[in-house]
Image (tube, grey):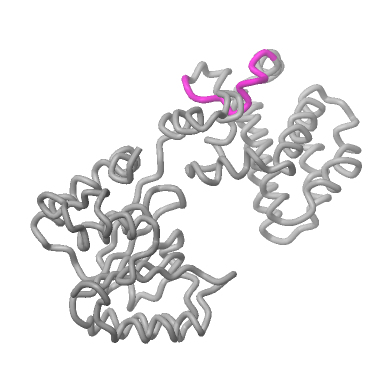
Amino acid sequence: MNIEEKLNWLQPVLVKQFTKTVQQKQLAHAYLFEGISGTGKKEMSLWLAASLLCQDGEANLPCEKCQNCRRVFEHQHPDVIEIIPDGLSIKVEQVRNLKAEFSKSGVESHQKIFIIEDVEKMTTGAANSLLKFLEEPEGSAVAFLLTTAKQRILPTILSRCQLVHFQALTKKKLMAELETKGLSINQASLLVQLTNSVEEALEMNGDEWFQEAKKITWKWFTLITSKDSQSFIYVQTTIMPHFKDRDAHRRLLDLILLAYRDVLMIHYHTLDVLAYARYQKELDHIKTEYTGKAIIQAIEDVLLSRKKLESNVNAQGVFEQLVLQLMK
């Protein structure tokens, strides 16, 4: 699948819109592409960059075969400047280089394209430099700013860019893509409930910690739903040693919430992807032990525990209290 085919699969509406914009030579000088990871923001920026530099394309669209197109997609074209965070932020040295590039003309063409990933991670100095460029663009420069956290970007930068929202993948599309990557339906069914990103789903699937986390959570869930008193002790002996930090604590609650969601879906005969599809028989049995009202109450208890975690309440205490609530 070439980049245009991938974009047509990920963002068909945006491809149609930008095709018209490119053909009419009406690209703005600055865009802010926002949306969760894996939705095609980087691919779209490269495809548009290639459209501006392509040697052989028809109707101003990239051919994806000429030397310029290949170099753009291989991140080797000197007139396409890509900036990605160095660690947790875009560093001072990167900003200096960016400032210098803003004032230069293209090396091989009159066109210059800037692609800045995770733009929300820019330091204040970097953001101010970018703002100056956005206010006074030089020559035929186009900037594509990519973000997963629009709310963290300065309003002055937002106001000077055309905002483009990248829709998350539907669960059906994500399931299909994960299956083409070699994942089974049972593996993919849980992942699509936790992320809308193919890349993040594949990363989680290959993570040994996550694989163990799934097993531990399911075991805890079965202990709780069978009213086994070991579920309380299990928090100290098994859960806390594995789920060691705040992110892990949140993940645990996400996983057990999905188990109760599955029971609710089965109870009300709702046609949707079960997160724990591999345990369909067990879920069918658990469903018989609960009323719809009891399942909803259990979900509310888990959600309340999540709120407590966000208030920095001791995690072990939160999980032990949750067990007591769920076993009433």
Residue 54 image point, x, y percent = 20, 58
Q: Which residues are magenta?
A: 271-281
Q: Nearer the viewer, residue 52 or 241?
A: 52
Q: Is residue 316 left or right of residue 137?
A: right
Residue at the image position 47 percent from the left and 83 percent from the top: 124
Rendered view: 134 above or below 45: below
Q: Is residue 158 above or below residue 286?
A: below
Q: Using the image as rendered, state which of residue 262 and residue 51 is in the foreground.
A: 51
Magenta residue check for 279? yes
Give x and y (percent) for residue 213. Answer: 74, 39
**Quadrant of the snapshot with the C terminus:** top right
Residue beneath the point at 23% across and 74% down: 141
Q: Can you tell which quarter of the image residue 262 is in?
A: top right
Residue 99 in the image: x percent, y percent?
Answer: 37, 85
Location of residue 179 in the rendering, given as x and y in whole percent from the top left corner = 50, 28
Picture layout, residue 32 above or below residue 41: below
Closer to us: 265 or 118: 118
93 magenta-colored: no
Residue 7 in which image quadrant: top left
Q: Nearer the viewer, residue 134 or 153?
A: 134
